[in-house]
Image (cartoon, grey):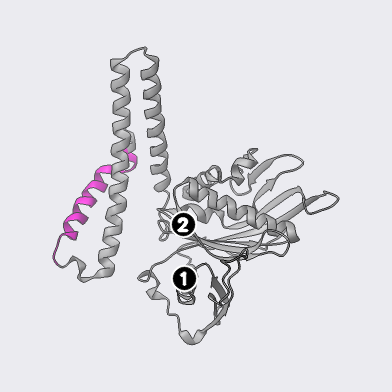
Amino acid sequence: MRRSRSVFDDAAKRRRIAELDERSRSQEFWSDAESAQRVMKELAELREESSAVDRIAERLRESRELLGLFENDAAAEWEAQQNVDAAAGELERLEMAASFSGEFDSHNAILSVFAGAGGVDAADWTGMLARMYLRWAESNGFATQIVDESPAEEAGLKSITFFVRGRNVYGMLESERGVHRLVRLSPFDAAHRRHTSFAAVDVIPEVDALESTEVNVNPDDLRIETFKSGGAGGQYVNKTESAVRVIHVPTGIVVASQQERSQAQNREVALGILRARLVARAAEERDRKLAGLRGERQANEWGSQIRSYVLQPYQLVKDHRTGVETGNVEGVLDGGIDTFIWPYLQQRRAPA
């Protein structure tokens, strides 16, 4: 435990907590709302990390006491092992959190998936990837909100965009940006031949109003269109043009929202996503300070994929950046992508 406290410099964090806590109690603290919000956010994150260190120490202490009191007792050994395993998991999460040093790593994420080459199989693959990320978010306790969804004619999706909200979500999901390749026997081919299809994943951080002040969105630069939101039909289908599409003419960026009930709400969501994309773009241009924030979007076809998913003739998922691979394709498609996220973060953090 002494080693883990040293690794995370727990004493320094606690001194920082005391300093920020004292600052937050001053009468002038909220006179600068932007500064105050940043302080409170940092304070909450530091307290969470220190609490995690305390929980690890407590679990290990309980394990030592159990083994000391009930030597050679199977039940005590089992309980002690449970505590050690839980402490190890908490320690791994702390270590992962230490990887998030980028300006936006602690933010929520806006994730989009776009169908690429491969026809109906690519559209189906886009839907499969969307489900994979939604399942990953659910298993980690992160909130999700679909804001735009474009169904394909035969099956699957042309594209989908949704929020994933939770601590360090962007820091984790930015590893998923790139082209994902699927190889399988196509269920849409009467001859049941093997097909290769592609989908592109894009991830940007969600930003708040304070963070987007550096981006000036001129209303004259916007073209706003309304349309009927999609749906499965039935009595609840939206019969009014409440969905909103916003085109930022100078950059060509197009965003849409169709999941909210009113046009005003969809407009607000779409403008928020537009601001996030413009902030990401500005950060990219700012001396490449956040190298890889978006990266160059790769051609959504052969030779540019970051990961391959092979269902037939064998089963394998391989990340082409880290070399990590697994034969548990079903587990990965059910949201088990931490297998790839953590090695990528370690590789990114490693000195050049």
Residue 194 location (% of width, % of height): 80, 49
Q: Camera-side residue: 66 or 105?
A: 66
- Which residue is at 60% across, 68% downward? 230
Q: Is residue 120 left or right of residue 136?
A: right
**Which residue, given by chain and number where applicable, does mark 2 sit on?**
170
Rendered image quadrant of residue 265: bottom left
Neighbourhood count class around disc 2 (C-alpha, 10 Å): few under 14, some 14–19, many 20 upward: many
Question: Toward which corner of the image does residue 54 lie, by quadrant?
Answer: top left
Q: Which residues are magenta?
A: 5-27
Answer left or right for 203 relative to 20.
right
Q: Which residue is mark 1?
A: 269
Foreground pick, 110 / 229: 229
Secondary structure type for disc 2: helix
Of all residues, the one furthest to the bottom in this rendering is: 220
Measured in 3D between alpha carbons, the distance from the residue under mark 2 to the one under mark 1, in whole angstroms, is: 18 Å
Kind of element beneath mark 1: helix
Q: Position of residue 251 (x, y in %)?
A: 55, 78
Q: Amino acid at mark 2?
A: Tyr
Residue 15 forms part of the magenta stretch: yes
Amino acid type at circle 1 is Val
The structure residue drawn at horizontal position 58% and vertical position 68%, both measured from the top left corner, is 237
Residue found at the far front of this picture: 235
The tag on residue 226 is none
Question: Of all residues shown, which one is farthest toward the top?
Answer: 72
Q: Nearer the viewer, residue 264 or 302?
A: 264
